[in-house]
Amino acid sequence: MENFVAVLIFTLPGLLSYFWIQLFGLNPTSKHSNFEIAAISAILWFPVGMIVLGIYQFTATFVNRQIADNSWLSIRTLSDVLELSNNLAFLVYFVSFSVIFSFLFSWAVSEFVYKWMIKLVNVVRNRSGTAGLSRTSSVWNETFLNNDPQVISIGKIDNPEVIIYGEIEKVSRPVELERNLLLRNTQYYTKLLKDNEDVKISNVFVDTKTGYVVTIYNNDDVAEAVNH
């Protein structure tokens, strides 16, 4: 039981931050191994864990100054943290505040720190003549994980005669093993877009591994074709 509590104390803030950051959209280009997740979680533990323990230490110092018996144990070493973990009230506090501050920390990283870091990195890359990094970690993210409606057609390089038209409803997350698209109104958009040269193409996504080609149509042209 003591080992479980120790693992909980020293892994929970980092793991929560890792998964919050992924939910906010900062996904790796490939799935991390268990060792990589453990290493990242250990790094993320410091900002969140230190904030939670710092709040406790500040409160303990304040309370002990008001009460002469020093009923609140101060944190000076990791052994003090382990000793406190035997206290159920501290454990509830630590878990609850870890959830709250891991969320706030991950939101700040996703919203501000990551964008600032990308800008700084691109300054260096541009000066060295290297193309700048995109806001997202992969072409899939950049193309399909936006809020804009997208009307597309899907075909294969080696079989261009078979094409499926439709509007994207759901898209796989970047870390999923398979890249899948859920389309709606396929019959309607097949009639609307097939052999329609008035609707221009905005972008073409090519999956070089599988040979699939996803053609993304201009939203304004699609809307005009729908209205007519």
Image (cartoon, grey):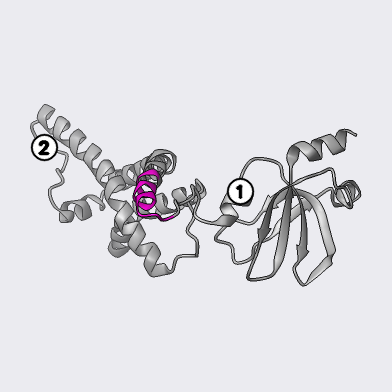
Horizontal relation, residue 81 to residue 173: left or right: left
Quarter that holds the N terminus: bottom left
Horizontal relation, residue 186 to residue 104: left or right: right
Residue 96 position (above or below residue 132):
above
Front residue of this view, candidates 132 and 108: 132
Measured as percent of width and height from the top left, residue 82 is found at 22, 55
Give the main secondary structure, helix, strand or loop, of the magenta stretch: helix
Q: Residue furthest left?
A: 68
Measured as percent of width and height from the top left, residue 4 is found at 33, 62
Say what amino acid the circle numbered 1 marks: Leu
Measured as percent of width and height from the top left, residue 180 is found at 68, 60
**On the image, numbered disc 2 is attached to which residue?**
70
| Crowd class of label 1 (few under 14; some 14 to 19; many from 20; radius 10 Å) | some
Q: Secondary structure at mark 1?
A: loop
Residue drawn 17% across and 39% down?
72
Quarter that holds the C terminus: top right
| Crowd class of label 2 (few under 14; some 14 to 19; many from 20; radius 10 Å) | few
Residue 129 inside the magenta-drawn segment = yes
**On the image, numbered disc 1 is attached to which residue?**
145
Say what amino acid the circle numbered 2 marks: Asn
Measured as percent of width and height from the top left, residue 155 is found at 78, 63
Asked if residue 9 can be seen in this view, the reply is: no
Q: Nearer the viewer, mark 2 or mark 1?
A: 1
Residue 53 inside the magenta-drawn segment = no
Q: Secondary structure at mark 2?
A: loop
Horizontal relation, residue 197 to residue 73: left or right: right
How far apart in space, not on screen, are marks 2 and 1 (Cα)?
Answer: 54 Å
Horizontal relation, residue 83 to residue 173: left or right: left
Front residue of this view, candidates 127 and 43: 127
Residue extent of the magenta highlight? 119-130
2 or 1: tag closer to the N-terminus: 2
